[in-house]
Image: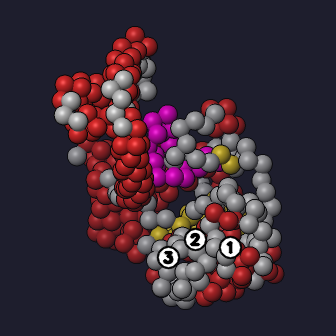
Amino acid sequence: MTLAKAYLTIAKEHNNLHLAWELGSRIRSCQLLLSKAAMRDDDDEPISLEEAEPVIKSLSSLIFKAQDSHYDIATTIMTMKSHIQALEERANTATIQGTIFGQLASEAIPKNIECFNIKLTAEWLQNKSLQLFSDEQKKKNSPRLVDNNLYHFCIFSDNPLAVSVVVNSTVSNAEHPKQLVFHLVTSEVKYGAMQAWFISNDFKGATIEVQNIEEFTWLYPKYISLLNHLRFYVLEIYPQLEKTCLEAFHRYYKYLNFSNPIISTKFDPQACGWAFGMNVFDLIAWRRENVTSRYHFWMEKNTDRLIWKLGTLPPGLLTFYGLTEPLDRRWHVLGLGYDLNIDNRLIESAAVIHYNGNMKPWLKVSIARYRPMWEQYVNRANQYLQDCVTS
């Protein structure tokens, strides 16, 4: 099609309007064919050879006809070059826009989920008995929150529904859910909704603590996303614990500026990164290695953003360099938020499936074949969810 468009321009310049019209018509037919192929659903039949072949052959014959016109070869090359450059610019622009729009879509809160959050917040603010019950549960559960014989999970999020699915799926697949303790930290805005949901629902006897990030007055407020940066303060938040599972692969050179001597002299550019959203931390080793101080060191070194631009993965790669042990990748299956081609057998045998990427399961842009695995742990019987889904 690029070649045909080049000949279309040349034909117009040489006043060969009939050939230009024919080329334009065939190009539009090809574009319609491509559009149909791109817009088809997973259940639709693919474009057949009988449908595609006449369109492609018709355009090919016109290109040969244009070549037989013996247009000046230098003019043809220059025209094609300008077309290719224009296409490259459009492709680059589309890639940048796609990245930006994808990020915006992943961060946007659908109307039904925002409705759910508002109803929960209103319930928390208006229901004093719910707040009193929460205070009673805190006192009752306080010994369990620091019991190292139990299994502790830390989740930092401002999405009550997503957190609920993580907790529900974990307790539903645990042999002894009463041995599980979940430490949830959320934003001040979502604190009421998170409290109302987890205090009002039973999660098979698991202990659940909800904390407001504003309680941690010692945090550095300059960080853009405090909830994301909390993972570097696990020891400070839970100083009495020894191990915790934190719910939050690439080579180092993809994330860090190795032209900077402080990086190139200390780190291997080919070292493997890891999925930083889900980790098991040994907090005794954390204290011994003084991990939080390491993190502060690198954050101070990067005040001018010359080592990395944004995000928590680059400082994580620097902070935990040499301190990690790999897990069997079959244990933690990644990519359900962007990869369309994950083997079902891998998903079924995984201990953890991770919807990392922009196509989160609660968004319309989610990948349809992975959504049911997430939705099965949504409490559809809840009246607030029913009201908001139908509103």
Whether residue 102 is situated above or below residue 233 in the rendered picture: above
Q: Amino acid at mark 3?
A: Leu
In the drawing, what numbered circle is on residue 312?
2
Q: Amino acid at mark 2?
A: Thr
Q: Which residue is mark 3?
A: 226
Q: Main secondary structure of the magenta part?
A: loop
For the point 53% across and 67% down, the residue is 156
**Element type at marker 1?**
loop
**Element type at marker 3?**
helix
**How is the protein colored in the picture?**
secondary structure
For the point 62% across and 66% down, the residue is 255
**Which label lies toward us, 2 or 1?**
1
Location of residue 275 by image quarter: bottom right
Residue 188 is one of the magenta-drawn residues: no
Alpha carbon of mark 1 to alpha carbon of mark 3: how far? 27 Å
For the point 61% across and 88% down, the residue is 300
Q: Is residue 251 left or right of residue 121?
A: right
Viewer-nearest residue: 111 or 32: 32
Q: Can residue 287 be seen? A: no
Q: Which numbered disc, 1 or 3, marks the residue that appears first in the sequence?
A: 3
In the drawing, what numbered circle is on residue 258?
1
